[in-house]
Amino acid sequence: MTFDPGLGGIDPAATVPAGDASPVRTAVLAAYPAVRAGLRALLESAAGIAVVAELPPAVLGSPGRDDRFDVLVADLNGEPEGLRAGIAAAYPGMPVVFLAAEAQDHTPVPHVPSGYLLRHAGAEEIAAAVRAVALGLTVYDPAVPAAVHLDDGRPAPAREADGGEPLTDREVEVLALLALGLPNKGIAQRLGISEHTAKFHVGAILAKLGAAGRTEAVMLAARRGLVSL
């Protein structure tokens, strides 16, 4: 999964509130109660997130809807286009993390911080997406069509580090997962490579970007356009 650094290039992994900072108030929206309950359980296991509402799609047409939350996590199972339109009308400008069964089911939402994930995404990925969109970023699974994250007409990101040695395709994939704060083991599992190989790629990325650490690498990559928007 990749994140949009357009509003500051903040590493989602560094956005977990510390101490008594306010958690991200989150609502989950899904057609089936079991799915809503499952999303609540996933999110409540993550630090810095408070699930304050479970909503059925019918609430989108209700004048008395509950909007006392910061981020909406919406399962698009069934009618993705209708749900997207209903959410846009009911909660204009609301940051939303969309979960779709297929990558092709995602349609970009212009000018709104959004997450585009697949339904099999794990708790860590969904939580990272919630924190990111709450900060005004956009995140997406690498499988999501490029039209979603390049819909604003901007060119595809450069892959060179300030004119230095270009990143390989694999390093770009690793960089996207670094932006989520995944450890080497998590990167290895996600890409189907060994942990040693993941560590090697991370080291190569740090060297090419001139970064002292993983978070700095993500920040530098965001500023240089190495992470897709």
Image (cartoon, rainbow, N blue to C red):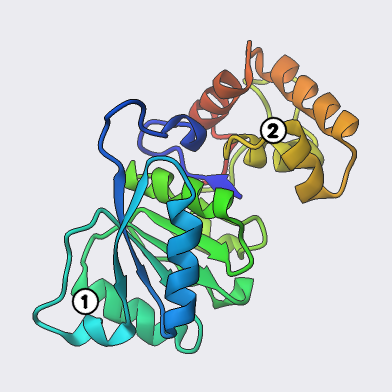
At mark 1, the secondary structure is helix
- Could you tell me residue 179's position as x and y percent? 58, 36
Task: Confirm or deny contact between disc 1 and disc 2 (CB under 8 A).
Answer: no
Amino acid at the residue labelled 2? Pro
Above or below 46: residue 31: below
Above or below 31: residue 50: above
Amino acid at the residue labelled 1? Ala
Count all numbered tags in the image, as a single digit: 2
- Residue identified by numbered label 1: 89
What residue is drawn where x is 54% and y is 48%? 155
**Residue 206 visible to an observer of this rendering:** yes
Callout in the foreground (1, 2): 2
Q: Report crowding for label 2: few under 14, some 14 to 19, many 20 or more residues within 10 A (C-alpha).
A: some
Indicate the quadrant where residue 10 lies.
top left
Left or right relative to 207: residue 212: left
What residue is drawn where x is 72% and y is 43%? 173
- Could you tell me residue 72's position as x and y percent? 33, 63
Sequence-wise first label, 1 or 2: 1
- Residue identified by numbered label 2: 183
**Residue 75 visible to an observer of this rendering:** no
